[in-house]
Amino acid sequence: MLTGDLDRLLAAISPGTTPGDEITGRITSVGTWQHAPPDSGAGPGTYATPVAFRLAGGNAAKAIRIAMTLAAALRRAGWVRSATVMDGYLTVSVTHDALAALAVRITLAGPACARSTALAGTTVPAPPGLDLASAPDWAQARRQLSESISARLAEAAGAHILTSYPAERLPGPPAHPEPAAPGPVGDAVAFAGSWAISYAITRLAPGTTAVPDPRAAAAHHLGNPAYAVRYAHAHAASTLRQAADLGLGLGEAAQVQSQLLAYPAELWLLDELSWLPERVAGQAGAARRPCQVPGAAGQRVPRRPGAVPGNGAGGKDGRSPCRRPAVAGGGVPDSAARGP
């Protein structure tokens, strides 16, 4: 959400109003945000973009001047703590209040907090209906899940989902469908549940021949990520119920005291959540376009030494942007198991 706020700030800069009129086109930074390099000492709520290189047509010296102009414009926003330039990269840090406010903004937005316009103007075919229990084998189950999640990610990133045939031409479901033939996938779904098996499939590495363990998928302990998420949700819902029993309401969003969210773990979590739109767009888009820095119009952008290669997904591990997401190889990203 914060990267979207920054996108709007940059887009509001009018071309031709900068010193030397070096910015001549509309500024579009959607999908270009990356984590600052590990050696920069940047804390939570820091975002970097190479957008100046695209605006400069690849001219490094011009990119530095444009980035400095953009940084000066961003500093005028009260919620921007700092905006600096290194080798043409624009790095922005937001204030603690802006980062803490995400707790309220994400809660109010719900799944929409992961949406962006990174793939606006593109069309993605609608996947077939997802019915894991009917899959004859694990390879088909992974394929179904991959297609379904890829389409949902693309839609969240602004793509238009196109149905191959008009609805009136699609055959309707049979009045009395035949039960699915017994098989390993159907048995696993019957034992652990469709959602648990879906999540277990997303945890498998692309290209592996391993299959989910239904017992592990259904295990009720915090070592099982699927259960841990449900456990945390149950505790949050319980807290709200207990508060209601005491006559306490949610209150107004404006009454939230940002200073209460100051622990390092809380700031780390808020920072991770702030990258949801970028991660969703990166996973959805990387399988659809050639290897390039997103938003660079097909042009490779030079990186400063030590910079983390970014593909719009906000990765911190220094992986090359040429690496396709798991969905490209038949697997699915575990962060997208439930969609945005």
Image (cartoon, rainbow, N blue to C red):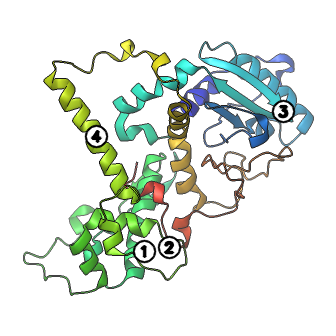
Density class for disc 1 (Cα within 10 Å; few <14, some 14-19, many ≥20) is: some
Q: Residues within 10 Å of mark 3 (few under 14, many from 20)?
A: few
Q: Are marks 4 and 2 in contact (CB under 8 Å)?
A: no
The residue carrying mark 1 is 143
Residue found at x 79% / y 45%: 307
Q: State the SS at label 3.
A: strand
Q: Is residue 117 visible?
A: no
State the image quarter where residue 200 is shown.
Answer: bottom left
Can you tell which quarter of the image residue 272 is in? top right
| Left or right: residue 284 compared with residue 239 | right
Q: Which residue is mark 2?
A: 330
Mark 1 vs mark 4: in front: 4
Q: Residue at x 38, y 72 (%)?
A: 144
C-alpha separation, residue under disc 4 versus residue under disc 2: 34 Å
Q: Nearer the viewer, mark 1 or mark 3?
A: 3
Cβ atoms at labels 1 and 4 below 8 Å apart: no
Location of residue 295 in the rendering, given as x and y in whole percent from the top left corner: 67, 45
> Which mark sits nearer the N-terminus, 4 or 3?
3
The residue at which mark 3 appears reads as: 86
Is label 2 in contact with label 1 (beta carbons under 8 Å)? yes
Considering only order in the chain, which callout, 4 or 1, is on the residue closer to the N terminus?
Answer: 1
Distance between the alpha carbons at the discs numbered 1 and 4: 34 Å
Q: Kindly identify the amino acid type of the residue bearing the numbered disc 2.
A: Gly
Amino acid type, callout 1: Arg
Question: Label 3 sits on what residue type?
Answer: Met
In the drawing, what numbered circle is on residue 235? 4
